Image (cartoon, rainbow, N blue to C red):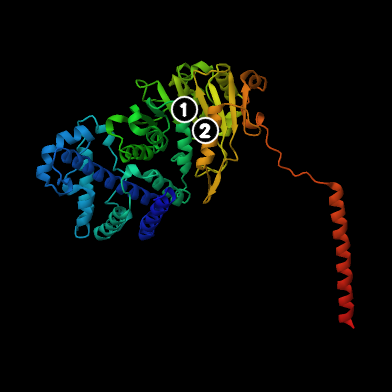
């Protein structure tokens, strides 16, 4: 099945589930039920597959964990939790609950108990924080599902069956990010109606892939990857696709301030078969209360932080002494935290590492404190590349964003500018980076050479002379697409048109005279 066929199949299924629940559950809440049940199905199948494989390896070729009794399964609980971070009894696996769902008059209570049991299985273990609260958004007893228990259970059966019918195949073999794609599609369906900004939750997969590829150029493996505003984790997880999860040796690190997306990110890690000991996702405000002091520096940093949000800035006198922000001698404005995130990432970047950050375009040219921060970055040769992206890539905004690439160890004292504003294809109601678009941008980043109307390598001294303005349009000349016109030929054509008009008028006048007679 091709990437587009997989995506279409997924969208059709989700749309069908939405139709089944239309008028019953608010779309924004419905999103949580779909993603939650998708997660429940995945970890059930993932655990079953893992245990079956281990048993079959020892010669038990007919072993099927889903058919084992709960009593027998209990003997392996401790080892399973140690290896996978959680435990599910055979009777509580998605496939077995779905099979009995229609006849289970207490289905809502059954699911509620199972979700608690999965979470509680990690209590007191190293994986406790990774499992805690993962099912909080799936309230199976909510009146939103129906006024009566019977009505709620009827809808829960529909959701279980619809998710169960979804053709996921072997998750690792899918060419699309199934969970990420389901999340993006649900955002597109519901976020605008719910007054939400989907762009802050999800970075398009093609952009995520480009960011990951930029940071691993020349590397086949890295120690640690990090995103200080990780959302649902789509950026971090692109490293598993680009390098292979085994080649991110010490794991995936991130922080997220929004509790819903913090939960989604941890779910997403499990859905991508990233084991609990290989990820550390924290909840909180990265700028004020960063959680990974003991884990920095990082080899690869990727991020799409929220655009121009407010933060404490100089209202907090302690921040100017923070080692992340103090080198620039000034804090990002209270009304625009963009470059505060940038300084944070630079501070936690390893000497040989690369950071690729999606930025609001205003950071490239705004004055005041932001200009002073750009001066610090340019004078110290930390900005490697600035890439202008096409408009209308991100859900919730049509703004043409950009990418700033940071490095601490550069071979030249210059900044590469890439104007990729025309590198897109139209897909549905949004622009998208095609594989060819992405490869052209990446190759330009690697080659670091001038190309008319596309790239230019600019000495930092020239940027300093231009008041540290790093807007791409200041350095890469737009291609002149105006058509050259032959004025003499045009005048002859106009004269012919005027002559023909006069002939038509005379013919019409003659017809009118005949009619009047």
Tag on residue 432? none
149 to 121, vertically: above or below: below
Tag on residue 442? 2
- Closer to the camera, 279 or 315? 279
Q: Which residue is mark 1?
A: 217
Tell me if residue 335 can be seen: no
How far across and how far down the image is residue 102, in percent? 22, 60
- Closer to the camera, 182 or 375? 182
13 to 289, vertically: above or below: below
Question: Which element carries disc 2, helix, strand or loop?
Answer: helix
Q: Is residue 189 left or right of residue 167?
A: right
How far across and how far down the image is residue 282, in percent? 35, 30
How far across and how far down the image is residue 110, in percent? 20, 51
| Residue positioned most to the bottom | 517
Q: Are marks 2 and 1 in contact (CB under 8 Å)?
A: yes
- Closer to the camera, 8 or 187? 8
380 to 288, vertically: above or below: above
Q: Is residue 189 left or right of residue 102?
A: right
Residue drawn at x 68%, y 32% as measured from the top left: 477
How far across and how far down the image is residue 237, in percent? 38, 35
The quarter of the rendered structure image containing the C terminus is bottom right
Crowding at mark 2 (Cα within 10 Å: few <14, some 14-19, many 20+): some
């Amino acid at each position: 099945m091709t990437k587009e066929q997989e995506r279409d199949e997924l969208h059709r299924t989700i749309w069908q589930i939405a139709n089944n629940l239309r008028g019953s559950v608010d779309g924004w809440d419905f999103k949580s039920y779909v993603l939650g049940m998708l997660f429940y199905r995945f970890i059930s199948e993932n655990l079953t597959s893992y245990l079956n494989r281990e048993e079959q390896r020892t010669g038990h070729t007919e072993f099927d964990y889903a058919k084992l009794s709960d009593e027998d399964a209990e003997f392996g609980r401790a080892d399973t939790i140690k290896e996978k971070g959680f435990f599910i009894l055979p009777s509580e696996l998605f496939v077995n609950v779905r099979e009995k769902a229609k006849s289970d008059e207490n289905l809502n209570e059954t699911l509620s108990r199972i979700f608690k049991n999965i979470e509680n299985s990690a209590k007191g273990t190293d994986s406790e924080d990774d499992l805690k609260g993962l099912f909080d958004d799936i309230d199976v007893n909510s009146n939103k599902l129906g006024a009566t228990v019977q009505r709620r259970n009827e809808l829960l059966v529909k959701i279980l069956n619809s998710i169960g019918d979804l053709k996921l195949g072997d998750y690792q073999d899918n060419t699309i990010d199934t969970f990420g794609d389901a999340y993006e599609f649900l955002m597109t369906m519901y976020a605008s109606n719910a007054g939400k900004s989907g762009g802050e939750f999800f970075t398009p997969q093609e952009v995520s892939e480009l960011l990951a590829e930029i940071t691993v150029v020349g590397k086949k493996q890295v120690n640690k990857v990090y995103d200080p505003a990780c959302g649902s984790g789509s950026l971090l997880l692109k490293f598993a696709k680009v390098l292979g999860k085994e080649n991110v040796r010490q794991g995936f690190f991130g922080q997220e301030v929004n509790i819903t997306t913090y939960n989604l990110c941890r779910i997403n890690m499990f859905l991508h078969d990233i084991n609990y000991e290989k990820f550390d996702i924290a909840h909180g405000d990265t700028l004020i209360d960063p959680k990974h002091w003991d884990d920095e520096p990082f080899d690869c940093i990727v991020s799409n932080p929220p655009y121009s949000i407010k933060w404490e800035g100089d209202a907090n006198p302690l921040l100017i002494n923070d080692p992340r922000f103090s080198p620039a001698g000034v804090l990002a404005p209270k009304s625009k935290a963009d470059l505060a995130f940038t300084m944070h990432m630079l501070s936690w970047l390893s000497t040989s590492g690369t950071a690729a950050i999606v930025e609001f375009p205003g950071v490239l040219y705004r004055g005041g404190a932001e200009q002073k921060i750009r001066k610090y970055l340019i004078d110290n040769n930390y900005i490697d590349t600035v890439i202008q992206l096409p408009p209308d890539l991100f859900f919730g905004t049509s703004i043409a964003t950009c990418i700033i690439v940071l490095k601490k160890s550069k071979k030249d004292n210059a900044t590469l500018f890439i104007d990729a504003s025309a590198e897109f294809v139209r897909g549905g109601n949004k622009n998208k980076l095609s594989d060819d678009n992405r490869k052209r941008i990446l190759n330009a980043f690697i080659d670091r050479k001038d190309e008319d109307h596309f790239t230019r390598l600019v000495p930092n001294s020239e940027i300093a002379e231009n008041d540290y303005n790093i807007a791409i349009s200041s350095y890469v000349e737009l291609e002149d697409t105006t058509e050259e016109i032959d004025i003499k030929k045009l005048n002859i054509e106009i004269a012919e048109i005027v002559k023909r008009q006069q002939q038509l008028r005379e013919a019409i006048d003659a017809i009118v005279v005949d009619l009047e007679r």
